[in-house]
Image (tube, rainbow, N blue to C red):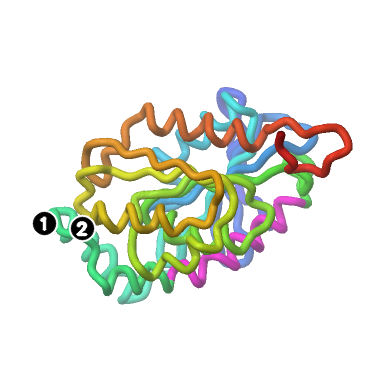
Amino acid sequence: MRFLVEEISDGVSERRFTHGDVPGVLWTPAGAVGGRPLVLLGHGGGGNSRTPVLAARARRLVTEYGFAVVAVDTPGHGDRPRSARDAWFEAEIGALLAAGEPLSRGIAEHTAALAERAVPEWRAVLDALGGLDEVGAEHPVGYWGLSLASVVGLPLVAAEPRITAAVLGLAGHESLTGAAARVTVPVRFVLQWDDELVERTAGFALFDALGSAEKTLHANPGGHAGVPAAELESAARFLERHLRAPVAPGLPAGSVF
C-alpha cells in the first residue's frame, strides 16, 4: 500500500493511496494510535472513492463513531482504465434513469463481471490495512454499499470472514441470489419503494435470499437516488451497534449476547 497525499481537517486524516493499480482513500481520526473498527465503503455506478457524498459519509463515521473508513475505485471507475464496455455501462445507466426503466440483463451481467474483479481487490486492501497501527487486524469490519456497491458487496461479504455486519440494498437480480444465500452476518437491506432501476419484487426476492439469521428490510418512498438522510443516519447506528457489540468475558471476539 503506497500513500500518496494526506490532508487533515476537522480532526480527520484523509489519505489517498494505491494498492497495486487500485486507487483508494483511507479516513481515520487525526493522530490516531491503536486499532479500531473498520468500515469498507462502496460507491455507486459512475462514482469513485472520492465522490463528495461518499467522503462526507466517511468523515461522519470517523468523527461521530471513531471508525476507520476506506473506499476504493471499482474497476472501470474513477482513476482506473475504462473499457468500451465500461463506457457503455455508464451511458446505459444514465439512459435508464432518464427513461425510468429497470436494469437490463446486459447491465446485470456487466456489474457481475465488475464484482468478480473487485472482490479480490477489496480483500487485498483489507489485508494491507490490517498491518497499520491505526487500523489493526483484530477489530471488527463492516461493509456499507448500495446499488453497484451492493452488487460488489454481496459476494465480498459472503467470501470475507472478517466482515461482521453489512448495509446493502438498492439491488435485485436473480444473478445475485447465490451470493446472497452465502451471507450469514447481520444485514440491513435498504429498498426504495419507487426505484426506477430495481423492480420492487426483485429487491424483495434478494432480501428473502439472504442467508442471515438477523436481517431487516428498510423501505422508503422515492426513487433510486432518493434514500432519505434519516435512513443513512440509522444505517450508521446499525454498524456502530454491531462493530462495537459487547463481548462476554472468556468468549471469543464476535460472540454477542
Q: Nearer the viewer, residue 74 or 23?
A: 74
**Viewer-side label of 1, 2:** 1
| Total marks in image | 2
Q: Position of residue 206 (x, y in %)?
A: 38, 57
Q: Is residue 241 left or right of residue 231?
A: right
The residues bearing labels 1 and 2 have C-alpha atoms spaced at a distance of 9 Å
Looking at the picture, tell me which residue is in the foreground, 133 or 20. Answer: 133
Residue 252 horizontal side relative to residue 206, left or right: right
Mark 1: give few (<14), some (14-19) or many (20+) Cα within 10 Å. Answer: few
| Magenta-tinted stretch | 114-130
Judging by the rendered image, the residue that carries numbered circle 1 is 99
| Residue 73: percent from left, percent from top | 48, 57
Farthest residue to the bottom: give it: 84
Residue 239 placement (x, y as % from top left): 56, 36
Badge 2 is on which residue? 94
Residue type, label 1:
Ala
